[in-house]
Image (spheres, rainbow, N blue to C red):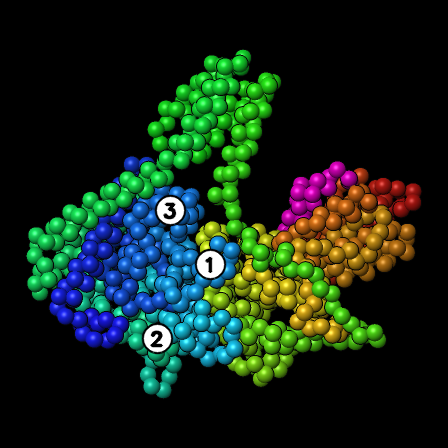
Amino acid sequence: MIKENTNTTLTFEDFKIEVLNDYTTATISRECSLLGRKEVLTGKAKFGIFGDGKEVPQLAMAKAFQNGDFRSGYYRDQTFMMAIGQLTVEQFFAGLYAQTDIEQEPMSAGRQMGGHFATHSLNEDGSWKDLTKQKNSSADISPTAGQMPRLLGLAQASKIYRQVTGIPNASNFSNEGNEIAWGTIGNASTSEGLFFETINAAGVLQVPMVMSVWDDEYGISVHAKHQTTKESISEILKGYQKDKNTNGFEILKVKGWDYADLIATYEKAADIARVNHIPVLIHVTELTQPQGHSSSGSHERYKDGKRLSWERDYDCLRQMRLWMIAINIATPEELDAIDAQAKKEVLEAKKAAWNAFLEPIIAEQKELISVLQEIAKTSVNQEAILKFATELNGIKSPIKKEILVTARKALRLLRNENEKEILSQWIISYTAKTQKKFSSNLFSETALNVFSVEKVLPIYADDATEDTDGRMILRDNFDAIFTKYPEALIFGEDAGAIGDVNQGLEGMQEKYGELRVADVGIREATILGQGIGMALRGLRPIAEIQYLDYLLYAIQIMSDDLATLRYRTVGKQKAPLIIRTRGHRLEGIWHSGSPMGMIINAIRGIHVLVPRNMTQAAGFYNSLLECDEPALVIECLNGYRLKEKMPLNYGDFKTPIGVVETMKEGSDITLVSYGSTLRIVQQAAKELDEVGIDCEVIDLQSLLPFDVKHDLVKSIAKTNRLLIIDEDVPGGASAYILQQIIEQQDGYNYLDSKPETLTAKAHRPAYGTDGDYFSKPSTEDVFEKVYAMMNEVNPSKYPSLY
């Protein structure tokens, strides 16, 4: 029996009204799917992936979903979003048409294809809304099972809010930890490793997660027998079943067409998760997919007649209809009327969405036509320009591309005419206005972005000497951070009891507890997911990946989810996660990698910081905690035992982000590097001084953002020569650095010699001290490379060494 929030039983009349409202929502959603597919096939929309066949279980999930809860879902959840009041029919079609107006297409303003849903967590200024007063959906991504790691963090946040005291503004994010994180996934996608990694982690952590598996027996065209052992995810997960003496999951199974049983099942799951923080898996079986996987093909190609007949009979809407008739909720005629009204409503909303999408573009089309007609009056190319105007005018449903292509091609005809200025200015203005709709919010555009933080220098005692291990500076700074920010927490492999593998967190778990300084299993992708989910709910997590090499396990989540989050929500969601790792200059293939080119090109949208020592690293953590942006901090793996001066102002000194630092001034050549390799460069510079070569040595400090003050080109203007030293592979980060200096900063204007790079070998570094020496740049390599460059300038002063 359905119950109200007051837990009193509904009257039959109330029950009837609620069921009919649910049926109406489901029918509207189905009509959206059917008409949406037609819009793709007629060319109005580019691609369609719809939620038909999954409507009834999503109604049940919506009933158990409360304010403050979060969804991390699957791209077929349109009925659920409609049922919780977060998706209208017009918005559904606006997403299908790639409407770039965030007011009309609030999911992503056309940046994602339809079926990818989100709610707005932020106010216009980037500050948090009260998430406990709304139903929340974290922004979807397309990669199958990619939503799973984030789901874990969304659930864990409830555990933190329930058990950790003193978190500022906690009441805006949680009602004493009573929120559930609701996950959805297709049955075939449970084959992905991310699914199993998340399920295992949730069972260990015991967090309030309800995981729904929509099972229609297929993954696109591939049957479940090729996807899942025993063809059943609930069967093979039975070992995760919780009992009174173990952790684990509650596992429930329900038919996807049984409306009453679905509601009872979801109520039960919600009670278990919300009250007891026990994760629940709901395997929703016997679902259908009436139109196949997507608009790119038909399921008749891979389903036999028997299966197609079964799907028609057990379509969840048909079964719900038969059930309502059987228990006298409605007559066939009454349901026919609902169906007819749904068709009408969806059709009208579709037309309204299409007109709202098209009208401003038509206005731009007419504007350019007018400009072209006016220019043509005095142009020697009048006929050709008027032809452009006529062809553009003949496009009944124009897109922005067609308008701009016409303008840019017409401009070529005016290159020797005075009228060129009119059209060129129109193009510049139109491009600037339009480009923002597709390119804004890769990084924060709020007052809390990384550039808002002012540099604060470390303060030292007058008699301070370099007599402290670098790891002690990190440890004492983390101590200050956890005191200053009760919402801050850190977790990773060996981060808790032993204080991380390099002792940078020594004693922190004992002082701040196992929830704020936590050990986790060997599962990098879900470590990242924990961080993303908790950051989405107002916490300030620091996710630790033990070594830089292991970041590759998590690079997909960083790239597809975290890096794109602000962009794909047009600044309506944020996850200011800090990722801590350590790398460079150790020994052996799997512990000394420096895949910086891969990283910086895969995670645009996340800042990448490469401090040369632990004081700089600590300053970066302090800076980032005052910002609202995600970042990766790579500590120097061989720097924890190196001596540094001990600051007095832990937690307060701040390393500026995006600013380089000149470590040694010079006049002959500019040497650019970062991280551990910088120490090799500094030593080489000393030795080059002895032979009369005066090097300017610059520490990049951060790769994303890159030298925002353009200090590198100022150095090159003085030295007229450039060498970039990097321990990534050839063409890796060094190519990016060179592009930034030469192309973005116009450094080529000041070069008297070819800019050079000195990198590691193309292979992974071999084991041992000799392996490092022969695999990565050494002091001698730097010396000889610089010397050779100077030999080219003045061979008599610097005769060849070889």
Q: At 85% from the left edge and 41% from the top edge, which residue is drawn?
A: 793
Horizontal side of residue 461 vs 51, given as left or right: right
Which of disc 2 and disc 3 is earlier in sequence? 3
For mark 3, give the secondary structure. loop
572, above or below 97, in the image: below
Magenta region: which residues? Answer: 731-751
Residue wearing tag 3 = 104
Q: Is residue 672 visible?
A: yes
Distance from label 2 to label 1 (Cα)?
Answer: 25 Å
Residue 740 in magenta?
A: yes
Q: Amino acid at mark 2?
A: Arg
Could you say which is closer to the camera, residue 177 or residue 662? 177
Q: Nearer the viewer, residue 297 or 275?
A: 275
Task: Name the residue at 51% across, 23% down.
Answer: 410
- Residue 105 image point, x, y percent: 38, 48
Which residue type does callout 3 highlight?
A: Gln
Mark 2 burial class by Cα count in 10 Å: few <14, some 14-19, many 20+ = many
- Which residue position is annotated with label 2? 274
Classify 10 Å Cα crowding around label 3: few (below 14), some (14-19), many (20 and above). Answer: many
Disc 1, disc 3: CB below 8 Å?
no
Q: Position of residue 359 (x, y in %)?
A: 37, 35
Give the residue type that dot 1 points to.
Leu
